Image: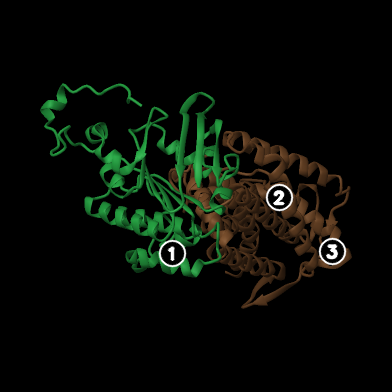
Amino acid sequence: MTEFLGAVSGGVGLGAVYTLLALGFVIIYKSMQVISFAQPAFMFAGALLVTYLTPQIGFFLGVVVAAIGIAAVGLVVERLAIRPMVGKPVFVIAIITIGIDVIVRTIGGAFVGRDPRQIGDPWGNQTFDLAGVTIYQRHVAAVVVTTLLVLALLAFFRWTPIGLAMRASALDQEAAMAQGVSVGSVFAISWALAGALATVAGVFAATNTGGSMDRNLWLVALAALPVIILGGLDSLGGAVLGGLIIGVLQQLVAVYHRDWFPFLDTNLREITPYLVMLVVLLVRPHGLFGTKEVERV
Amino acid sequence: MLAVQNLEVVYDDVVLALRGVSLEVPDGKIVALLGANGGGKSTLLRALSGLLDIHNGEIRKGVVTLDGASIGQLKASAFARRGIKHVLEGRRVFKELSAEENLRVGAHANRKNLAANLDRVYELFPVLKDRRDGQAGLLSGGEQQMLAIGRALMSDPRYLLLDEPSLGLAPKIVEQIRDIVVEINRQGTGILLVEQNATMALAIADHGYVVENGRVVMDRPAAELRNDADVREFYLGLGAEGDAAKSFRSVKHYRRRKRWAS
């Protein structure tokens, strides 16, 4: 039982990372009906920026500054590469985001060097006991921060004029334009938000592996695709729940792999999200909370 | 004054929707725009509110002017900020937002008097006040139309462009909408009213235009249009003598004139 609960707590910590990434995907999807494949690169670049900032200004301030920095990168990328393509088929824009992903990762990769870089988080591998279950501090931190960010996002979309305008624009773009909503700024803000969220996700993806990052950190972000398929492409709530489900499931498979699949040598952990995605696409292609008519790229 | 001169609009570089239209909406007046489907009425409204762009439409010739300054090249948000609000055909409320959230979005272009405008809209449409927290998609058709008009009023517009506000509504509701349009106009907003329901439109308008195939074929004070034999026959459904609707038996052999004599 303690083993199970330990796996769940680790899974929730992992799920928090997926949730943050998936929220970025969903926000961009809702505003422009495009899946941005540049999210992994933003996450990678964000974590990398933190590794450079932490020695200078400390970890927490570093994360905030990096999030703002990557949000700015998102703004620039949207303005230069995406905005001129508005009106083109979504497939074209999706391909461009793949290009952006490769470019950002290549540039970032040059700053990583040969050895893993330390993110400099205060949690490391420290644990505490809760009713006999060993829980990592970093997982608690990830869950707390993610919860706060999700609540902040909800408040943003509910009460601020621009958040309301973004929701309106997602429902009916032309009607929103007729109210004076600038669709361009809606696109820009969604990219900035996605960039900031990806940065925080990148930080926790790095702490989850013990506090260091290398060039392959971005691979974690690919699991966010199964998350949004599971939760529904256009549902923020689906991103949160989907992230938790995939995270917990993946951690359970990692822990119980040897008992469940003794005949397999390699751990199924890595492909669990994609197996879930396959099942979801077969059984319920619009996901848990997605809109049924949603067109897929 | 909001006006267009010799406006030519092309969709997708191919379809010529307006062929040299001139029209004026003076401050504080109601102008009716009549015409059959596909005549270019909605296109004209889009040109007046900057919404041609997302329909792949483009102004080829002519100008859209506000107080003499050309504004045709601006973005939709700039039109709304300058006080030109377009109420789209088919109501187009934000279905998953609450009624009040819809109204708040309507104030996006001008948030100065948000609270006062909210009160004003609730005064004009008391039914919206009762259902302010309900999802807009669950309102009835008439209530949605009221919400769409109220939403446009939230930013204190100088001109309101109404695209078929009576579409698909019961006669009782149409009367209500008509009275509300008159009331909004009385409070100082200039109105361009596009309507299939010509009787209703001409009853309240000061001036009327008839467009056909992308051209303005009639441009007269509403009172004259109401008495024009052709308009009575084609748009008001009255016989040439003026009293009763004609029997369908005589419609059978009736052939429409191809062009208006203008």
Query: Of residues B73 and A177, which is closer to you in this image?
Result: B73
Crowdedness near tag 3: few (<14), some (14–19) or many (≥20) residues, C-alpha within 10 Å: some
Determine contact: label 1, label 2, CB under 8 Å.
Answer: no
Inspect the image, locate mark 2, and give the three-letter code of the amino acid beneath it. Answer: Leu
Is the residue B124 above or below the residue A291 in the image? below
Q: Which residue is farthest bottom?
A: A131
Mark 1 or 2: in front is: 1
Asked if both marks, 1 and 2, belong to the same chain, the answer given is no
What residue is shown with label 3?
A: A54
What residue is shown with label 2?
A: A75
Residue at 75% across, 50% down: A73
Inspect the image, locate mark 1, and give the three-letter code of the amino acid beneath it. Answer: Glu
Residue at 13% across, 39% down: B243
Query: Of residues B15 and A210, which is closer to you in this image?
Result: B15
Q: Can residue B206 be seen in this view?
A: yes
Q: Can residue A279 be seen in this view?
A: no
Chain B's shade in the image? green
Mark 3 or 2: in front is: 2
Q: Which of marks 3 and 2 is nearer the N terminus?
A: 3
Chain letter for the brown colouring in the rendering: A
Task: Specify the quadrant that holds the C terminus of chain B.
Answer: top left
In-image side of B198 versus A249 (left or right): left
**Label 2 is found on which chain of the structure?**
A
In-image side of A286 versus A246 (left or right): left
Measured in 3D between alpha carbons, the distance from the residue under mark 3 to the one under mark 2, in whole angstroms, is 24 Å
In-image side of A50 versus A154 (left or right): right
Mark 3 secondary-structure assignment: helix
What residue is shown with label 1?
A: B100
Query: Of residues A170 and A226, which is closer to you in this image?
Result: A170
**Label 1 is found on which chain of the structure?**
B
Asked if both marks, 1 and 3, belong to the same chain, the answer given is no
